[in-house]
Amino acid sequence: MTTVTDPALAAPEDMAGSIADPGVVAGGPGSPANAAPAGRWSHRHLLDVDVLTADELDLIMHTTDTMTEILARAIPKVPALRGWGVTLLFYEASTRTRVSFEVAAKNLSADVVNIAASTSSVTKGESLIDTIRTLEALGARMLVIRHATSGAPYLAAEHFSGSVLNGGDGWHAHPTQALLDLYTMRAHLAGGSVAGRKVVLLGDVLHSRVARSNLWSLTATGADVWVCGPATLLRGFEAWAATGVAGARRFTVTSDLGGALRDADVVMALRIQRERMAGGLLPSLREYAARFGLTRERLALARPDALVMHPGPMNEGVEIAPDVAAGTQSVVAEQVANGVAVRMAVLYLLAGARDGRARDSGARDSGARDGRARDSGARDAGAPRTSE
Ligand code: CP
């Protein structure tokens, strides 16, 4: 990948510029830290990874390399988003996503505003649309939103003139989690690629926005993805795989834990989402742990160097045994740390696109065309839609 120099990514002693060419962005192993891989980014929003091509995913990964280099500096701060208002609007609890977005935006010199819906005028009945319009009037140019309702960020994108980043919506999508997961896998797998690697997503797939987004990004980059769990927590996914919606993508759905784990390169345990669990889906957490929990004995079925991942927060002793979560194969802490660099990369790319490079991408990304904000309940009931 060719590179260009971007003064907005220079070390503080050189801090003088804004994004010189925001669509031509940064990074690449071995490159100077303010050099950028040349590549085009045309998206106005980041609502999910389903609209991203393999090349665009690659651009994010290389831009993240640059951000990782910046984070290794004595002062990990660059002026790329100086003057940009970045507002974090969280309607659901979060530690990792919220803090890492805040750190990422501050590292890029953005002006960050952090709002929890529970302490905002939402509690007085203000609608999502009114809240968004208010935040825009108060200077927000980028809006990171987490919401319990699938599709809420798509609705936000229809009413916000800046960029919307989905920080997790209902069961639907968690794009930056999928991106940091991909980055973490690539950092560890020989050849720096997930292509042809067996990646197992294990557990409460039904309620998992992390699994849905990972399915898109991992299959787009050539991984052999297996989703595994009790049949009640796989509902809709078999149909998606069987109808060929996944096309040439490699995607297997099974409740056979041994078959899924055998020779796996990566095992990602998913949180049992008790807060979203309807009655009757699981007999008990104890039975789930006994039949599907990721223990040391079960992990031994995977390749000896298999990566153990978890998006967090973890229910240790339920979906993952404590000694596995803290074991030598675990990269859970690295996932969290990589979240900052990945979120710096997407903020940087989106800022570039907002400087005039994506005049037609708003409609494509907003969901307005296919009514996604309105039919999100139906989407949750089954498999993700395809954008291809
Ligand atoms: N993985 C994740 O989204 O964690 P938080 O809920 O803490 O943000």
Image (cartoon, rainbow, N blue to C red):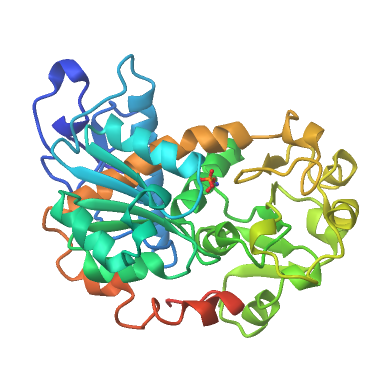
Which of the two residues, 281 or 355, is positioned nearer the viewer here? 281
Residue found at x 17% / y 33%: 8
User: Which quadrant does the C terminus fall into?
Assistant: bottom left
Q: Is residue 267 above or below residue 368?
A: above
Which of the two residues, 104 or 334, is positioned nearer the viewer here? 104
In the displayed structure, does residue 299 sit left or right of residue 215? right
Residue found at x 69% / y 65%: 277
User: Which quadrant does the N terminus fall into?
Assistant: top left
Q: Quadrant of residue 380?
A: bottom right
Residue 77 percent location from the top left of the image: 27, 25
In the displayed structure, does residue 354 sit left or right of residue 113? left
Q: Quadrant of residue 210?
A: bottom right
Residue 382 percent location from the top left of the image: 61, 78
Q: Is residue 367 above or below residue 325?
A: below
Residue 309 percent location from the top left of the image: 66, 43
Q: Quadrant of residue 146?
A: bottom left
Q: Is residue 39 in view from this perspective?
A: no
Q: Is residue 262 above or below residue 387?
A: above
Residue found at x 48% / y 57%: 174
List the single residue furthest toward the front: 124
Q: Is residue 78 in view from this perspective?
A: yes
